[in-house]
Amino acid sequence: QVQLVESGGGLVQAGGSLRLSCTASGSIFRRSTMGWYRQAPGKQRDLVATITSGGSANYADSVKGRFSISRDNAKNTVFLQMNNLKPEDTAVYYCNARYLSSSGYPREYWGQGTQVTVSY
């Protein structure tokens, strides 16, 4: 069973920075596309950023130029560096892992989420 454990959330003032981390157990990390999603109260869960096993990154328009996703395959960890945070970035941030199993079926796992709160 794969487990994703997030850390790094917290309370920060607008304009500040936070760095989220997500460490995966098991052996699937290197072949997974890793991602960060977020969900604000009363809203759907939205994509923030993804990074493929080869290191290609993709970002939501709302975070381009402010957030940066990276991965350390040796530590089975994906990071989300968040700079110039805005109150509208307030949400629970979830780590996601997606990969194809050996039989070709897509598999997906989620972390438990970490709260990010940005005050005015």
Image: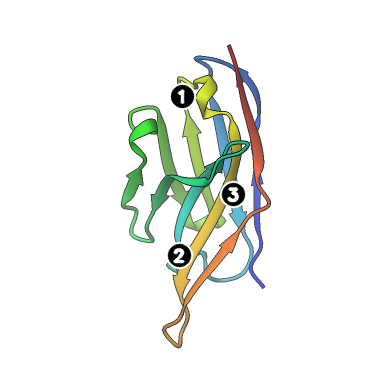
The picture places residue 72, in percent across and down from the top left corner, at 48, 51
Element at label 2:
loop
Q: CA distance from mark 1 to mark 3?
A: 18 Å
28 with respect to 63 (left or right): right
Give whichever of discs 1 and 3 has the lower sequence position: 3
Residue at 64% x, 64% y is 25
Q: Amino acid at mark 3?
A: Cys
Residue at 34% x, 53% y is 55
Element at label 3:
strand
Q: Residues within 10 Å of mark 1 (few under 14, many from 20)?
A: some
Q: Which residue is mark 3?
A: 22
Q: Residue furthest front?
A: 42
Residue at 49% x, 20% y is 86
Q: Which residue is mark 1?
A: 83
Q: Which residue is mark 2?
A: 32
Element at label 1:
loop
Q: Nearer the viewer, residue 21 or 64?
A: 64
User: In terms of image quadrants, where is residue 31?
Assistant: bottom left
Give whichever of discs 2 and 1 has the lower sequence position: 2
